[in-house]
Amino acid sequence: MDETILIVDDEPRVIQLVQTNLEMEGFRVVNAASGYQALEKVSKDLPDLVVLDIMMPEMDGFETLQRIRQISQVPVIFLSVRGQELDQVKGLDLGADDYVTKPFSIKELVSRMKAVLRRTRAKPSGEGQEVVVDDELRIDFNQRVVVARGQEVRLRPTEYRLLYQLVTNAGRLLTHGTLLSRVWGPEYRDEDQYVRLYINYLRRKIEKDPKNPKYILSERGLGYRFKGFGRRA
């Protein structure tokens, strides 16, 4: 492997534990003890992934991620003692790719890091066609362009992968487990809240009325399906 991982944490013990295990897996590891150091390392070392603590002095992880997103789309995994769902939602809303709670299993963390890197490298094939859902929604999977009601919509990579799975299986029920496996990876089989969150993100961006969606439909307790359509450009 030649991926570079940036570990950001003000606890030397945590940095040493993660760094030792990642180097055994063949990763190149750099570290930072504060948000300000993290910003410098992101610009200088161009890491392939950042593992970011939240509770740090001077600038916490949430603010650090906001500043990282001003200069880079590098995938970020939060690693924090703050395990409440509100904190997880806030982290994902700000653009994190995953959220792991301390105390953590180093094996699970490494597994999820590899899953994030796989998702980052993967580019779903859209058969080079533009899908015309109706007069208000067009999706060009080849160009990775989504146009809703005449306006281009910017999707984050995970949102795009989720939309791809829904649209290319239009009319079919996709369970939470199926979506987790196809979009996030088998490591996420118990993370149903990720599906709910990202469905909400997509609805806000492509639905005229997210609370009464006409494209992404819920099957209560089972999963989701995209409305059926029959036209391609």
Image: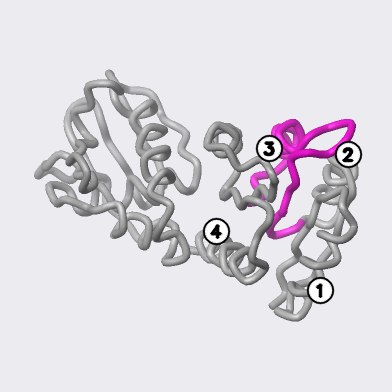
Judge by depth and name the residue closer to the eye, 17 or 226. 17
Q: Which range of residues does the magenta coloring cover?
A: 47-75
Residue at image position (32%, 22%) is: 150
Quarter of the rendering containing residue 134: top left
Q: Which residue is mark 4?
A: 120
Q: Nearer the viewer, mark 2 or mark 3?
A: 2
Q: Residues within 10 Å of mark 4 (few under 14, many from 20)?
A: some
**Which residue bears the numbered disc 1?**
20
The outermost residue toward the front is: 103
Q: Is residue 123 left or right of residue 20?
A: left
Disc nearer the start of the sequence (4/1): 1
Between marks 3 and 1 in the image, the one whose residue lies nearer the viewer: 1
Please give the residue where the numbered disc 2 appears in the rendered image.
36
Q: Position of residue 114 (x, y in %)?
A: 59, 68
Residue under label 3, please give it: 69
Left-right relation of 25 to 116: right
